[in-house]
Amino acid sequence: MAIERTFSILKPDATRRNLTGAINALIEKAGLRIVAQKRVQMTRAQAETFYAVHKERPFFGELVGTMIAGPVVVQVLEGEDAIKTYRGVLGATDPAKADPGTIRKEHALSVGENSAHGSDALDTAAIEIAQWFSGNEIVG
Ligand code: RTP
Ligand code: MG
């Protein structure tokens, strides 16, 4: 399996409830290394760009509003098969359908406030990482 990098966001519902450490523990327990991390307040324009793929969906306005409701922690995670591994650690988008032990089952409040984001493919991971980190901020 290849060593990959994926992009992660700990969403405002997670930072608000002081869950950064608890979620990072699940990430590290899964064998992923946090090779970059910073806390930022997303602007509306940044959130709209980040989730542009969903701009025609009925939940887009709510999604953008939730992402800018408070600070987020943006991260780069590195490890074997990192994209798929992290999607597994996240669990299903709807926390009610997520497996026990996943971030969303253990911590998320709802589909809208589901605590964390993970890239869904290698190409989107590279785009998302480049949106939030310069090369010298990532230390593998
Ligand atoms: P993410 O991009 O945040 O990692 O989530 P995901 O891949 O599991 O799900 P995706 O389909 O990309 O949806 C992005 C986010 O939009 C919100 N959503 N709300 N109300 C709804 O029906 C609905 N569907 C999706 C979720 O917060 C989801 O994480
Ligand atoms: Mg997604």
Image (spheres, rainbow, N blue to C red):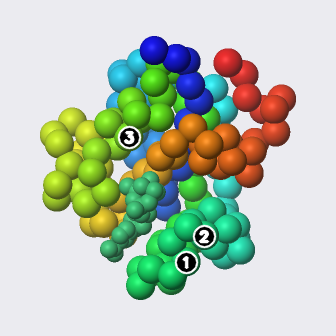
Name the residue at the top extreme.
Answer: 1
Q: Identify the residue at image location x=57%, y=55%.
A: 72
Which numbered tag is attached to residue 52? Answer: 2
Q: Secondary structure at mark 1?
A: loop
Residue with the mark numbered 1 = 55
Give the x, y percent position of residue 115. 39, 54
Question: Does mark 2 have its CB less than 8 Å from ligand 1?
Answer: no
Note whether 102 is above or below 48 in the view shown: above
Q: Secondary structure at mark 2?
A: helix
Report the front residue among 84 and 71: 84
Note whether 137 is above or below 113 in the view shown: above
Q: Identify the residue at image location x=38%, y=40%.
A: 87
Q: Identify the residue at image location x=67%, y=41%.
A: 126
Identified by mark 2, the residue type is Ala
Q: Is residue 130 left or right of residue 21?
A: right
Q: Identify the residue at image location x=82%, y=39%.
A: 134
Identified by mark 3, the residue type is Arg
Q: Quadrant of ligand 2?
A: bottom left
Looking at the rendered image, the quarter that the C terminus falls into is top right
Which numbered tag is attached to residue 99? Answer: none
Residue with the mark numbered 3 = 87
Query: Could you classify mark 3 by the number of other residues whose Cα lies within 10 Å: few (under 14), some (14-19), or many (20 or more)?
Result: some
Give the x, y percent position of residue 21. 44, 36
Q: Are marks 1 and 2 in contact (CB under 8 Å)?
A: yes
Question: Does mark 1 have its CB less than 8 Å from ligand 1?
Answer: no
